[in-house]
């Protein structure tokens, strides 16, 4: 991590006591953001579909319902979403609810467009009628760009697009936000509206289907090989706390009335975090030792093409927002494997997750060869995974 501490006190001064409507809190990123917002003193009403039945989740592991006013609604239904936020007059809306899986978008493209495009329009249409609203942050994806398979990172001014249903839905989401910005959020003293485009995020508490790091965790704990598609695909990999820090900086600036935040923002790793799937897999394989992680590379499935090369240019966030990545790849992997070790050991995951935020904010580094934030040792985890 970087040596300088993140200025969490400034975030707290802006967000403490502020009413935030957060969508998508039953998901992985949304659960971490709910925990961090609560830590900063925000008053949170959270709206989402229920978490998957019978599946482990961050939502259950850290008891997200105790952090927020938990309301279940489908953002694809204007009636359901309006009922969930009826009578509320928040300072800020953070919209994270989405269909977030590329492969699922091939299986059900209509549901993907309905959730990501129509759902966003419904959230924005409700938000524009909230009298005290200071800002809206819509979280999209690095995959919103028209991918040209080039080596340099996409900038916020680059063309939107998408050759698969998921990517196209995220490009469409950006267009919906821009339409509402120019049509309904034009007043000089009205709410600020921004979008955030993060890279491929991983961290503790993600059990989503068909994602590399959750698949690694399932393989290690079950003692079975992992099947890996497209080992040469290059992505901007980052720990979940990295983009969330950027989202919170945007949120605080909106509350403070900084109108220069209006627009799109990239939050991606430095160049060392832009690696292929096999490189990240090997990093996790090393971190899990002495557990054995066997990989089977399946290059035969070409029926559902995905981008080969994808990277983000986050210069705007660095220069104008003061955000920058704080973790190198080894630290991001260590934080992640430590979290799952602790979960396997039935630790208090709320406290453990808060300590990981503490470490991230402080910029503390673990001594070489040691796990972070009091996780079980590698040897203890090996016994648990045996």
Image (cartoon, rainbow, N blue to C red):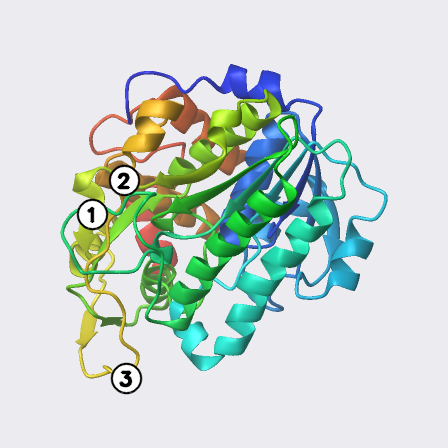
Q: Residues within 10 Å of mark 3 (few under 14, many from 20)?
A: few
* Residue occupying image coordinates x 51% and y 70%: 112
Sequence-wise, the earlier of marks 3 and 2 is 2
Q: Are marks 3 and 2 in contact (CB under 8 Å)?
A: no
The residue indicated by pointer 1 is 274
User: Which is nearer the N-term, disc 1 or disc 2?
Assistant: 2
Q: Is residue 61 left or right of residue 324?
A: right
Decide if residue 348 is in sight here. Answer: no
Which residue is painted at 36% across and 72% down in the image?
Answer: 164
**Residue at 35% of width from left, 65% of height from top?**
162
Q: Secondary structure at mark 1?
A: strand
Percent coordinates x, y for residue 375 in the rendering: 39, 39
Q: Looking at the image, can residue 95 be seen?
A: yes
Name the mark on residue 303: 3
Vertical arrangement, residue 216 with respect to residue 330, above or below: below
Task: Determine the secondary structure under disc 2.
Answer: loop
**Where is residue 245, by image quadrant?**
top left
Pick the residue in front: 49 or 125. Answer: 125
Measured in 3D between alpha carbons, the distance from the residue under mark 3 to the one under mark 2, in whole angstroms, is 30 Å
Q: Nearer the viewer, residue 194 or 243?
A: 194
The quadrant of the rendering that contains the C terminus is: bottom left
Task: State which tag comes first along the sequence, 3 or 1.
Answer: 1
In this picture, residue 140 sits left or right of residue 35: left
Judging by the rendered image, the residue that carries numbered circle 2 is 269
320 or 303: nearer the eye? 320
Around disc 2, counting alpha carbons within 10 Å, would you say few (fewer than 14), some (14 to 19), or many (20 or more)? many
Q: Secondary structure at mark 3?
A: loop
Which of 372 and 316 lies nearest the eye of the viewer? Answer: 316
The x, y position of residue 279, in whole percent, is: 16, 54
Disc 3 + disc 1, Cβ < 8 Å? no
Q: Find residue 193 and report its image quarter.
A: top right
């Amino acid at each position: 991590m970087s040596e300088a501490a993140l200025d969490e006190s400034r975030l707290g001064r802006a967000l403490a006591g502020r009413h935030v409507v957060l969508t998508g809190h039953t998901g992985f990123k949304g659960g971490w953001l709910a925990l961090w917002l609560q830590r900063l003193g925000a008053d949170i009403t959270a709206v989402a579909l229920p978490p998957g039945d019978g599946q482990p989740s961050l939502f259950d592991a850290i008891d997200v319902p105790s952090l927020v006013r938990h309301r279940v609604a489908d953002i694809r239904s204007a009636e359901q979403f309006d009922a969930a936020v009826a009578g509320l007059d928040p300072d800020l809306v953070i919209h994270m609810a989405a269909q977030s899986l590329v492969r699922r978008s091939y299986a059900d493209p209509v549901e993907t467009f309905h959730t990501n495009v129509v759902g966003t329009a419904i959230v924005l249409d409700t938000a524009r009628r909230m009298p005290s609203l200071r800002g809206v942050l819509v979280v999209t994806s690095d995959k919103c760009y028209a991918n040209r398979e080039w080596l340099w990172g996409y900038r916020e001014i680059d063309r939107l697009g998408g050759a698969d249903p998921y990517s196209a839905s995220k490009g469409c989401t950006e267009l919906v936000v821009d339409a509402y910005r120019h049509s309904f959020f034009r007043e000089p003293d009205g709410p600020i509206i921004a979008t955030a485009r993060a890279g491929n995020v991983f961290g503790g508490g993600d059990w989503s289907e068909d994602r590399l790091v959750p698949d690694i965790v399932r393989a290690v704990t079950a003692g079975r090989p992992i099947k890996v598609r497209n080992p040469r695909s290059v992505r901007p990999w980052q720990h979940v706390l990295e983009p969330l820090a950027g989202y919170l900086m945007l949120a605080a600036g909106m509350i403070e009335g900084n109108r220069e935040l209006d627009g799109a923002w990239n939050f991606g790793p430095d160049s060392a975090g832009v690696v292929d799937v096999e490189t990240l897999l090997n990093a996790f394989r090393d971190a899990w030792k002495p557990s054995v992680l066997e990989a089977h590379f399946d290059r035969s499935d070409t029926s559902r093409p995905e981008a080969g090369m994808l990277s983000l240019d986050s210069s705007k966030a660095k220069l104008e927002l003061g955000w920058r990545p704080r973790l190198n790849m080894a630290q991001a992997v260590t934080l992640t494997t430590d979290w799952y070790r602790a979960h396997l050991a039935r630790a208090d995951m709320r406290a453990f997750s808060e300590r990981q935020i503490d470490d991230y904010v402080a910029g503390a580094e673990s001594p070489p060869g040691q796990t972070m934030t009091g996780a079980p040792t590698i040897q203890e985890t090996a016994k648990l995974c045996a």
